[in-house]
Image: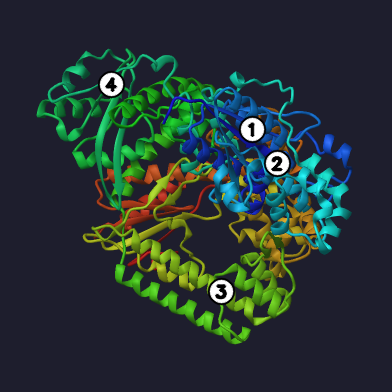
Amino acid sequence: MTDRPRLLLLDGHSLAYRAFYALPVENFSTTSGRPTNVVYGFANMLANVLRDERPTHAAVAFDVSRRTFRTEAFPGYKAGRSRSPEGFGEQLAVLDDLLAAMNIATVRAPGYEADDVIATLAARAEAAGHGVLIVTGDRDALQLVKDDVTVLYFYRTASEMVRYTPALVQEKYGLTPAQYPDFAALRGDPSDNLPGIPGIGEKTAARWIREYGSLDALVERAHEVTGKAGERLRAALDSVLLNRRLTELVRDLDLPAGLDDLRRRPYDQAALTALLDDLEFRNPSLRQRLFAADPGGGRPAGARATLKGRGLGPGELAGWLAARPAGLIGMAADHTWERGAGRIGRIALAAPDGHAASFEPAALTAADERAFAGWLRDPGRPKALHDVKSLLRVLPEHGWTLDGVASDTAMAAYLLLPGLAAYGVADLAARHLGRRPSAEGAAGTMLRAGAVLDLAGRLAPELTAAGMDTVMDEVELPLSALLARAERTGVHVDGDLLRELERRFAAGMDRAADEAAAIAGRRFNPGSTKQLQEVLFGELDLPRTKKIKSGYSTDLDALTWLAGRTGHELPRILLRHRDQARLRATVTGLIREIGRDGRIHTTFQQTVAATGRLTSADPNLQVIPVRTPEGRRIRRAFRPGEGFESLMTADYGQLELRVMAHLSQDPTLLAAFASGEDLHTTTAAQVFGVPPDAVTPDMRRRIKAMSYGLAYGLSAFGLAKRLGVPISEARPLMDAYFARLGGVRDYLDHVVAEARVTGYTRTLLGRRRYLPHLSSDDRRRREAAERMALNAPVQGSAADIVKIAMLRVDGALRAAGLRSRLLLQVHDEIVLEVAPGERDRVAGLVRAEMTAAYPLAVGLDAAIGCGPDWDAAAH
């Protein structure tokens, strides 16, 4: 690697179009429906190029409009191109934001194209002795190739890049780069609407330029070209010469940016992190690659710029701890956790006096270990950590306990801004502190500890101002300790039964594939979208579904629609195959996660769902079906472990509807709950104006769908889809429902109106959900924010109540000295492992604590079941 400057030039529009068509927009959009495929693809390509090429200077050139000097010379120039596809133009402005946050210059020249800007900057850089790299998907740039100018040409995606040097241009076309525009003038370019010579292909055009040396020489001696080819050439000379004028790139534009303006500068870390969060880019690899290319290196700035850190040797930790003044200390740890086992490799501490230290637990002396263990469990020594649950999960491996946690910076950031794409220390430090600790080893751990300390100082006042101290101190932090214990404990499973089910579901897939082949008249892969399209819409000519990039959709909704619309057997068989495949994948994932102790140790996630609900991963236990016989077979594999006699399940009845009744104070809902009768039957009787005993099953079904949909911001379209009826039938049902439940209607209207003023909604405990897009000019984003505003208080309050119930149940079990323990939380259900002889006492305790979790106007109701496995424990 030399110290020679290297200028990276990118054709913004060209690469943006390639990103748009390479990444299906249906797979790349935010929860509010905002398309992000262009920005994601562009950012991914940019991150790779910056990493691989390490330029000292960079710029992205964009077109200004389609009106240029070329359209003035030839009005038909690019006339055949269609308008930009929907969702493309709005993302170009976001690319400007991305590049601004990365401090990469963007350059435009009215009346000219991005290619001309690139040609001019390349010429300047070459003259100044810079190496030049041009990234584009436009072949016209090949004329710029020289010994010091390389074109990185992208075909479809960032992984299909060709590096054009003079030698490669010569090899591919048999021409020099300087001859390329002469060749292109003869060949024409359909994408630019530049006509070629009828009957003359690329091989002939290239041969003419090689033989005559240049287009000028060929034109001068055109009379020497014999036969039909010569006649065609002479007939097309005017258009060929025009092509040549239009193909030549301009290299002497008067641009506002000089080479010094293109020198790479450190990122605006906070702005880039906020943008990636807003776009919901959760891919950690993309973030890591983007930030790894920061010329500033993410070096610490501000309060921790002068961090005095050192690695401690044996016998030094006790003295270091004793020398630190009273006050909050930030802590970071490098640790592992897999299938119920974990270990800490390195710990770092950062103190308010600017001193930091790192050490390895395995290297501690007995005196150091006693001093550190005492500091950890001392409630009078306040500590700031990041994702405290992950540390609590592994501390017992070393025989340590933790107390005095004053701040969990991951949880604080989540409460303040739920729904961010990432809550890592580096991401939050970039957003809130303007720096990104990215060093490796002991130095990196100490920088993270310093960032945790500074984040705690920054976030704590904001949390207090938002009134969420109670949620943090009385719900989330205690819950972290409970969840850490549950994760360490895990839940016992029958591995043999799971493997038997895996074989059963695989056989079900095979049977469905055989039946599908018999109907189609040939074998095909039911898991292949392309083959499904060929069979369904080609060979069988079934009605077309939603149009997607590759043809017509074959997703779950599409197959369900086809089955109902046509009555054809094949879509139903394909749905069965897909169901068996999903079940098999679920079971395979469970088998993979069984630990040496025969138990599955899921990871509960507190900072994923924006509403406050817990999620689970590795494996995700919330995807195990409960309403189908096959799903219940999987639950039968979850059984009590050695020393326990049964599993117990407990969940709330109609929790979200009870929360809705409490929040709205709607008389009809309150009366329905107070009556003790079936809620949906009582409500249906009100809505349809009939006696309760005249309510039909279909009436009840419709009202149930309507009632539960309220917690999700259900629209008439959504209700129609749930019920399988036209919108014209669903809308009157909604009108009738709200006419009878006016309190619900008024409450929902009030929630959205208030959130427009404050910018957020609140749960019963004060948990906020910020919704900045409620005032957006973009209808899709605004309507998505309105749906979130409708469901956040209800779902969030229900989530808070479940968390409080878990804490109460766990606390009561421990206070009573019982061995029974809480294992899982799935949606509104908790699962416990019951010790011999404790069943009745545990059931009474669980019911008492769950029903007392929060004083709702309509009370809380908990259903409890017990049995030898998870399915048998259902109630």
Tell me the residue that label 1 is attached to: 60
Q: Are marks 3 and 4 in contact (CB under 8 Å)?
A: no
Vertical placement of residue 166 versus 700, above or below: above
Viewer-nearest of discs 1 and 3: 1
Mark sitting earlier along the chain (3/4)? 4
Is disc 2 placed on a helix, strand or loop?
Answer: helix
Q: Are marks 1 and 4 in contact (CB under 8 Å)?
A: no
Task: Please state, as top left, top right, bottom left or bottom right, where the C terminus lies in the image.
Answer: bottom left
Mark seen at residue 781? 2
Question: Which quadrant of the structure image shows residue 610?
Answer: top right
Tell me the residue that label 4 is attached to: 380
Q: Is residue 286 left or right of residue 262?
A: left
Vertical placement of residue 412 versus 151, above or below: above
As shown in the figure, which amino acid type bears the numbered disc 1? Val
Q: Position of residue 406 (x, y in %)?
A: 37, 25
Q: Is residue 872 left or right of residue 133?
A: left
- Residue 709 in view in this figure: yes
Tell me the residue that label 3 is attached to: 526
Question: Which quadrant of the structure image shows residue 522?
Answer: bottom right
Viewer-nearest of discs 2 and 1: 1
Vertical placement of residue 817 versus 69, above or below: below
Q: CA distance from mark 3 to mark 4?
A: 62 Å
Q: Position of residue 74 (x, y in %)?
A: 88, 42
Task: Please state, as top left, top right, bottom left or bottom right, where the N terminus lies in the image.
Answer: top left
As shown in the figure, which amino acid type bears the numbered disc 4? Gly
